[in-house]
Structure formats: C-alpha cells, structure tokens
Amino acid sequence: MSNDFTKVENPVLIVEGKQADNERLKAESDYLRGTIKEDLQDRMTGGFTSDNFQLIRTHGMYQQDDRDIRAERQKQKLEPLHNVMLRARLPGGIINPTQWLAIDKFADDYTSYGSIRLTTRQTFQFHGVLKPNIKLMHQTLNSVGLDSIATAGDVNRNVLCTSNPVESALHQEAYEWATKISEHLLPKTRAYAEIWLDEEKVETTEADEIEPILGSNYLPRKFKTTVVIPPNNDIDVHANDLNFVAISEGGELIGFNVLVGGGLAMTHGDKSTYPRCADDFGFIPKEHTLAIAAAVVTTQRDWGNRVNRKNAKTKYTLDRVGVDTFKAEVERRAGIEFSESRSYEFTHRGDSFGWVEGIDGKNHLTLFIENGRILDFNGQSLKTGMLEIAKIHKGDFRLTANQNLIVAGVSAEDKAIIEQLARDHGLINDGVSNQRKSSMACVAFPTCPLAMAEAERYLPSLVDDVEAILEKNGLKDDSIILRVTGCPNGCGRAMLAEIGLVGKGPGKYNMYLGSDLAGSRVPKLYKENVDEAGVLSEIDALSARWSAERNDGEAFGDFVVRAGIVEQVIVSFRDFHHA
Ligand code: SRM
Ligand code: SF4
C-alpha cells in the first residue's frame, strides 16, 4: 500500500486538455503569495489587480463592490467602489465572547455595512472592508486567535460539525474531529502570516514548503467537509464533498460512515453540471479519520478535472472515473479498507430554538437570526443585543449551518439575564412562525457579483406572504423547508429544499420541489422562470392540495412526490433534468 501522495497515480484518469487559467495562476503564485503584498500598497485603485484578484480568495477574501451603486458610479466615470468580503475560519462554528467582542467592534468601525453575516457554513462574513483596512482586519482576527485561511479558493473549506451541543454526548468529540480535520487539510504555506501578519519571510527551499496534501497546485476546485451526528442532518451532507457521519455504540464514538461526492451547484442550461447526492463509501474506525480525509482529498487532487472548472468538483470526478474506482483508490492511499456501512438515520435538519439543558448541566439557547444578518435594523437591535450578551457570557457561541446562533454553556444563574437581554433586543421573538424558521436565503444582492435575482432581501416579505397562504389553507402551524438562492450556485442550499427557488433573472426564479425533511434527495424542476406573483400562486395551489390530500403528518416534500406533482425523486445526477 502506498501513502505517497506526491505522485499522480493512474494518470489515465486525468482529464487531458489545456488547463484552466486558475491552474497557471496557482502554479505561478509562489505558494499563494502572488504580488498581494505589493498590490496592497497600491492606492491608485481600491481593488486587487491581475492574479491577486483571485489569489486573495485563498486568504479568505473576495473582492466585491456594491451592485446597487455600480451603474451610478459608472455614469460618473468612477471605478466600482471596490472592497473585500472576508469569511472567517471557524471549524464547527465555535467562537468565544472575547472573539465576538473583537469582531463586533471591527464590523462597526471598518465595514461599510456594519453587519456580521452568519453563513450557511457555520462562520461569519464581514462585507465592505476597504483596502487600507484589510491588514488591520487580519491582525484584529489574529489578536483573538481567529483567521480566514482557506475559507475560499481551491482548498478544503471551513469544516462543519453538527451544532447543538446537547443533542448528543458525542458533540465534543465530533467537534474535536472537525478541528483536527480542518488543521490537517490546511495549506502549509506561510503566505498568510507573511502578508497579513507581517511575519518574516524565512528562507525556504521548495521542499520545505511543499504542500504534502494539497499539492503545489492546490485542489482543482473548492472542497467541503463535515462531521455530522445523526439523526440531525443540520449541516446538509449532500452539499459536501466529504462527510464523516458519526457512529456510536453505548454513547461512545467508534468511527464514521464516510460519504463522498455531494454538491449542489449547477449552471442554468448546462447539462454537464448538476446537483448530486454523496455516495456512502462505508465505515471506518475513528483512528483512520485523518488518513481517509487525506486520501479522499489527494485522490480528488490528482484525478479532478483541471481543464474545465465547471466539472472540477469531486462529484464530477466520481461520475467520470466511477464510484468504485475512486473508492478503491482512497483505500489504497489510506492503506485501509472500508467496512460495511453501519446503520444510522437522518430524521431532520434545521435548528431547534430556545433553551435546552446539556448533558453537563449547562444550558444552551438557540436564537433564530433571519438570514444570519446580525445588525441593528428594521427596529431590532440584534447586533447590540449580541454585544451585550458577549460582555457577560462565560461559555461560547456556536454558529449553525442554518445561519443561526447558539449561546452555549450558560450556567443556571446566568440563564435569566441572558434570556432578558435576548428578548430586549429582539433576538428572541415568540411570534416568529415555524415557516420563517424553516426558510433560508443566500446573500445575493447587493454584494454578490454572481446574483441573478434577489434572495436575502426578498426572503422576509416572501415569508410574510407564505405565512398568510398557509394560514388561509389551514396550515398555520405547519411549515415547508423553503430556500431561495440568487443564482444556481446554490449557496442557500435551495437544491435540498422542499421548495427551492433558484434565481434566473431579476424577479424570476426556477421553482424546484420535493426534497424531504432529512435532506436525502435533490428536488426536481417544477416551473421555470416564475415571477414573484407566480411563486405565490403556485405555493397557494400546492399548499391547498397538501392541506386537503396529505396523509397524516405527511411533509410537503413527500406529498408532492407521492401525489405525482413532481413525478420523479432525484437521488443521482442520472435523474436530474435541466429545463
Ligand atoms: Fe457560495 C460563490 C456566498 C455557501 C456554492 N458564495 C459564492 C460567492 C463568494 C460569490 C463569488 O464567488 O464571488 C458568494 C458571496 C456572496 C456575498 O456577498 O457574501 C457566496 N456561499 C455564500 C454564503 C455566504 C451564502 C450564505 O448566505 O450564507 C455561504 C458561505 C459559506 C461559507 O461560510 O463558506 C455559501 N456556496 C455555499 C453553499 C452551501 C454549502 O456549502 O452548504 C454552496 C452549495 C454547495 C456546493 O458547494 O455545491 C455554495 N458559492 C457556491 C458556488 C458554486 C460552486 C460550484 O460547485 O460550482 C459559487 C461560485 C463558484 O465557486 O464559482 C459560490
Ligand atoms: Fe451569490 Fe449565487 Fe451564492 Fe446567492 S447562490 S450568494 S447569488 S453565488
């Protein structure tokens, strides 16, 4: 058995052709340094030039501009108001109060939107940081033990972990695995420390800096990993390249079932792209976790498509080389064989809100944060409320993969004051409906350069309307997993929703129906290019039928499949049909 990851095995499985420009860019980047340091000094432009525009992503930043004012600035012959969005690295979504206080202050002082935006991958983003403040931002994060390494670009991203610490005694160990996997798969280059933290460039040879797992050209595309504790699929395994499903015996973690090759993005009209559920490779004892993680990553590193980025993710590699071939290569590289999958069941997703008492006697309060946007706005002081809680909280905070937040590890004597603060600032609102709690949207306008339609800004009013429709149809306390994404990249995971709206153009959405509560299948295209009024009338008609015809307790997604409203359940790309 070979553990030598530096040689490309089985070259016949490599896609031939002219490599994508990103491959040149990574190869020439001197291990992700590029000329970012010099570019940072250039104040003639607010943006980053040439390759650095892409390279800053590997340091956790995207160059953006406010799309609401883009045309106006163009008219005035001004360059777009360039700024960066930063995405932090928080394995398992855990952040402590000191760190929260620091990011709260930075958001106030140096971001143009003033918000902390919780993401669908258990971390937070700053939007609107101007070039002169970027270094300060990294130094601020570093001063409290945070960084943004590898949260974007062709690397292993922030590693997710089931959030709710009470649901299982396994949580602490699962979280530790998420952290270990994140550290194990991080780039080894010192570029981040040199550029942002002013650490000296140490004389190194090529051999010193070689990336043993990621390789000198890093991965063909982004790569996403999770650790999940059934029965809650809160991190949505099928959106991820690599998932470790915790298997326990007598409350002890014994190992993981390994699921490989999930992913949700597609391009409208491009049949070579599709959402895909992950395949179950089998069970491994927990001591092999890091070896398996490295073997999956390096197999994808060596066999992934470096010619066409649209087909570069692990899901496409699996379908091109065959699941069995990929799995056998992982076994060969790790030097172990998967055994038969252990049984487990996902029954639900989403977060359970309010207080729960943990196994350690501590209390955990899950707060619903609409769209994950922590900001004082719309008559609510969410950001101030979080600040006040952070000032007195002695436990930690846990960001969930559904853009919500848990105040974790609260002692019995602090419960009342924390609840009071949360209520005073609108962080607890008993009037929030089940439907709102089951709805999610990606960022989209005004910051996302790829948005085709509104998502975050559309969601609150859409939910108002859906609530009214459900009430009219006798479904006031029911809910539908409703997700909106501004384009088919699927950041709001609409392609795992019971109703998924995928932006097609301004005010227009493709409507997908039929995932289930556990998130085990991809929904199917139901209507194309529907406007907002059309969306509501479809939801009205569908929910009226659901109300009248459903079996006892039948969820909406299961109903539309059983009733033949979407005739086919999508479990693999072979069943997926573009319009
Ligand atoms: Fe995403 C690109 C926001 C989760 C698939 N995503 C983007 C960018 C950076 C746009 C860009 O490339 O310039 C968006 C920035 C918007 C902004 O202004 O903040 C963006 N993605 C987000 C976030 C913030 C959505 C949110 O509302 O929370 C999520 C940040 C996650 C994080 O903390 O790391 C986010 N993105 C996802 C997910 C969901 C998930 O991972 O659970 C997906 C679908 C799952 C998957 O990967 O298949 C997702 N984002 C994409 C893609 C398509 C990738 C592909 O396979 O083709 C892109 C575009 C790309 O990579 O070329 C993208
Ligand atoms: Fe932007 Fe599209 Fe992702 Fe929404 S789904 S954040 S519009 S890339």
Image (cartoon, helix red, strand yellow):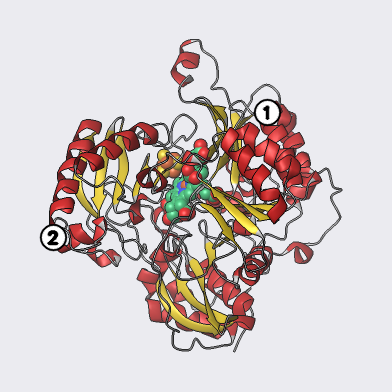
Sort mark 1 into few (<14), some (14-19) or many (20+) by Cα contacts within 10 Å: some
Q: Nearer the viewer, residue 116 or 277?
A: 116
Residue 203 tag number: none
Q: Which circle's residue, 2 or 1, is located before the other in the chain?
A: 1
Q: Is residue 493 visible?
A: yes
Q: Is residue 86 visible?
A: no
Q: Which residue is mark 2?
A: 563
Residue 108 tag number: 1
User: At which x and y percent is residue 386?
Assistant: 64, 39
Q: Amino acid at mark 2?
A: Ala
User: At which x and y percent is residue 271?
Assistant: 27, 55
Q: Nearer the viewer, mark 2 or mark 1?
A: 2
Quadrant of the image for the N terminus?
bottom right
On screen, residue 555 above or below 152: below
Q: Nearer the viewer, residue 252 or 201?
A: 252
On screen, residue 3 above or below 162: below
Q: Residue 507 lies in what quarter of the image? A: top left
Q: Secondary structure at mark 1?
A: helix
- Left or right of residue 212, residue 372 in this image: left
Q: What residue do we see at 46% from left, 34% from top?
A: 449
